[in-house]
């Protein structure tokens, strides 16, 4: 914990005493920042003067660095407002540490899109949240591509906001898409505030999640190269090749097959690097097809299971399967439709005896 007895004389002379929770929050935020990035982030923060920044010794242990930063913040009468902005800078830099979920807002039938006014958006958003919850900290910060980052620390009617469990929201003005970090209990309040502030009619989750928010943006904004597959699967040819002598016809056949796989792969995945998605989940709900005398499951109860594919870069991993000879080309549309359908959570159901996935509809 930050010790109040370690404050600089300038802070004591000013008569200002920084709130202990603010001091501790700033200290912990600085400790999270890698040593070589501390000065860069403090400069971006623009709360401490150049003269103050020059007094910080970044070559000492990080605990002492954090204490020096807190002392300087007390000289400048820092509040939770300034501490929240430093936290936003850190989380924007390390945005891939969070899991982001995509939401899409919709207009009512026949309703036109209004011109966006940032000041009006901020006012409506704050008013909507604070009318429902008194103890809440709301911070805004603008970034490139009309991205508005919103940090919300939630409290209750009787408790102050918990700054250590803040929710992050990224909204791109003039688009219906919102990216939200993990949130449970206050999700309805957040959705209500977003719809009200942006003048939309409704909002729904898209079943699309990832740690890489930039890839999620590439998917929903269609900033990737992919053509949905039109080829039909064809089994790979068996290759029984004697090590001592290779038939020229087999060499030619293998060459043609490799060219086909490359062509199919390019048709399915495109030429560019795939958006970064770490997982895809498929929930199967179908009737059990077993022998009646086995009496394992009745047809009244569907057979359920969940299959999850995980990889640091799932789409690139799937793209590499066929060229490596580990799968037929092309892969199933259930695996390749993720970017096109903008979702990586699927429910596969049985319709008139045929398995179908909700992701493959029009």
Image (tube, rainbow, N blue to C red):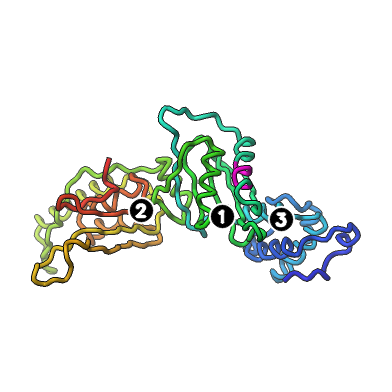
276 within the magenta span: no
Front position in the image: 295 or 88: 295
Residue 245 coordinates in the image, percent (x, y): 11, 65
The alpha-carbon separation of the residues under discs 2 and 3 comes to: 37 Å
Q: Please give the count of numbered marks on the rendered protein.
A: 3
CB under 8 Å between discs 2 and 1: no
Left/right of residue 254 with respect to residue 110 in the rendered view: left
126 within the magenta span: yes
Question: Of label 2 and label 1, which has the lower sequence position?
Answer: 1
The alpha-carbon separation of the residues under discs 3 and 1 comes to: 16 Å
Quadrant in the picture for residue 158: bottom right
Front position in the image: 56 or 103: 103
Decide: few, some or many residues near mark 1? Use Cα within 10 Å; few <14, some 14-19, many ≥20: many
Mark number, residue 167 = 1
Mark number, residue 76 = none
Left/right of residue 248 with respect to residue 50 in the rendered view: left
Element type at mark 3:
helix
Residue at 45 percent of width and 40 percent of height: 202
**What residue sits right under mark 3 in the picture?**
80
Residue occupying the far right of the picture: 13
Question: Of label 2 and label 3, which has the lower sequence position?
Answer: 3
Element type at mark 2:
loop
CB under 8 Å between discs 3 and 1: no
Residue at 48 percent of width and 57 percent of height: 99
Residue at 30 percent of width and 56 percent of height: 318
Report the magenta residues as a range. Answer: 125-130
Residue 86 coordinates in the image, percent (x, y): 67, 55
**What residue sits right under mark 2 in the picture?**
344
Decide: few, some or many residues near mark 3? Use Cα within 10 Å; few <14, some 14-19, many ≥20: some
């Amino acid at each position: 914990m930050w010790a109040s007895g370690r404050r600089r004389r300038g802070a004591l002379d000013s008569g200002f005493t920084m709130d202990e929770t603010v001091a501790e929050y700033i200290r912990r935020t600085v400790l999270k920042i890698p040593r070589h990035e501390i000065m860069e982030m403090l400069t971006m923060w623009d709360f401490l003067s150049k003269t103050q920044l020059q007094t910080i010794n970044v070559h000492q242990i990080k605990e002492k660095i954090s204490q020096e930063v807190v002392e300087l913040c007390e000289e400048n009468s820092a509040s939770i407002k300034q501490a929240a902005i430093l936290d936003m800078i850190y989380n924007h830099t390390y945005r891939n540490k969070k899991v982001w979920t995509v939401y899409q807002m919709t207009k009512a039938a026949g309703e036109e899109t209004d011109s966006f006014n940032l000041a009006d958006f901020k006012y409506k958003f704050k008013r909507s949240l604070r009318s429902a919850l008194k103890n809440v900290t709301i911070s805004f910060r603008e970034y490139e591509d009309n991205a508005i980052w919103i940090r919300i620390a939630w409290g209750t009617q009787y408790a102050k906001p918990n700054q250590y469990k803040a929710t992050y929201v990224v909204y791109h003005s003039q688009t219906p898409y919102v990216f939200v970090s993990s949130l449970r209990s206050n999700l309805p309040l957040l959705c209500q505030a977003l719809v009200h502030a942006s003048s939309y009619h409704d909002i729904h989750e898209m079943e699309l999640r990832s740690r890489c928010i930039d890839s999620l943006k590439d998917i929903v904004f269609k900033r990737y190269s992919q053509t949905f597959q039109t080829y039909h699967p064809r089994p790979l040819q068996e290759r029984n090749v004697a090590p001592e002598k290779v038939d020229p016809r087999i060499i030619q056949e293998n060459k043609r097959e490799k060219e086909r796989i490359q062509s199919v792969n390019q048709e399915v995945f495109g030429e560019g690097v795939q958006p970064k998605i770490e997982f895809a989940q498929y929930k199967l709900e179908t009737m059990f097809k077993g022998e009646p005398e086995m009496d394992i499951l009745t047809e009244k109860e569907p057979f359920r299971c969940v299959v999850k594919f995980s990889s640091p870069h799932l789409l690139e991993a799937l793209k590499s399967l066929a060229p490596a000879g580990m799968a037929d080309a092309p892969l199933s549309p259930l695996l390749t439709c993720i970017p096109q359908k903008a979702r990586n959570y699927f429910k596969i159901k049985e319709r008139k005896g045929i398995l179908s996935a909700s992701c493959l509809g029009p």
